[in-house]
Amino acid sequence: TTVLYLGRLDECKGLTALMTIWPDLSRQYDIQLLLVGEGPQRADIEAWRHRENQENNVILVGYQSDTDPWYQASDIFVFPSRSESFGNVIVEAMSHGLAVASTCVGVVQDWSRDAPLSVFDASHPKDFAQTLATLVEEESQRLEQGKRAAEFIRGQYAAPAIAEKYLLQYERLMP
C-alpha cells in the first residue's frame, strides 16, 4: 500500500506528526510513504529516515512538475497540515480517486461531515495512526472512499458545477 504526501516539506505542513507515527505503522503493515515536494524540512526528514531505518519505505521524490503519475501510483493521500487557505492537493488527490486522510484545514472545513474523506487531529497521534491504519487494513473501504471522493469532486468542482455556482451568485447580486 502506497501512502502519498504531496506538498511543501515544511513544519507547518504537519510532517513531524507524520514522522512520529510512521515507524510503528511501517513495522505493522506492508506500506511505503512517498514524499513529493521540496522545502526546508527535507534535511530533517532525511536524517529521520536514517535514524529510524526508514530508507526502504520512505521515498523522498523531490519536486515534480507533473504530479499525476504520483497520484496514480498511490493508494492513500495523507495531509497532516496545521493550516491551509484552500488545500488544492486534497482536491487533486480526491479527483484521482484516492482515499484521503487529512486534518480539518482549508477546503475540508467548508465541506459537510459526510464528505468522502477521513479527517483526523494530527495533535493526537493515536487518532492519526488509527485513521491511516484503517485505510490500510480496509481495502474495500479505501477503494469505495476513493470512488466516492472522485464523484464528490466532480460534483463540486467540475466546470459545469462551478458555472452554476457563479450564475446563482450573480442572480443573487442582481436587483
Image (cartoon, helix red, strand yellow):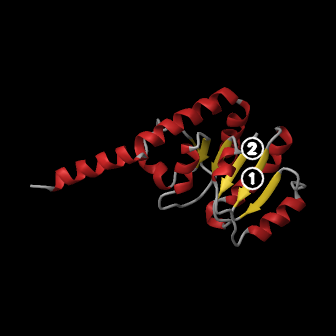
**Disc 2: which residue:** 2
Q: Is residue 137 something that shows in the picture?
A: yes
Circle 2: residue type: Thr
Q: Which residue corresponds to the image point at 63% horizontal and 54% vertical from the top-left?
A: 80
Q: Quadrant of residue 15?
A: bottom right
Q: Is residue 116 something that shows in the picture?
A: no
Image quarter (top left, top right, bottom left or bottom right) of the N terminus: top right
Q: How many residues crowd mark 2 within 10 Å: few (<14), some (14–19), many (20+)?
A: some
Residue 20 is situated, as x and y percent measured from the top left of the image, at 76, 54
Circle 1: residue type: Leu
Residue 115 is situated, as x and y percent measured from the top left of the image, at 48, 38
Report helix, strand or loop for mark 1. strand
Q: Which residue corresponds to the image point at 69% horizontal and 34% vertical from the top-left?
A: 134
- Do callouts 1 and 2 mark residues in contact (Cβ within 8 Å)? yes
Residue 40 is situated, as x and y percent measured from the top left of the image, at 70, 73
Placement of 40 over or under 102, stated as above or below: below
Q: Which residue corresponds to the image point at 58% horizontal and 59% vertical from the top-left?
A: 82
Placement of 57 over or under 60, stated as above or below: above
C-alpha distance separating marks 1 and 2: 7 Å
- The extreme top residue here reads 140
Q: Is residue 65 left or right of residue 173?
A: right
Q: Quadrant of residue 129?
A: top right
Q: Which residue corresponds to the image point at 76% horizontal and 50% vertical from the top-left?
A: 33
**Disc 1: which residue:** 34
Placement of 156 over or under 142, stated as above or below: below
Q: Earlier in the sequence, mark 1 or mark 2?
A: 2
Say which of 140 and 167 sits in front: 167
Report helix, strand or loop for mark 2. strand
Q: Which numbered tag is attached to residue 10?
A: none
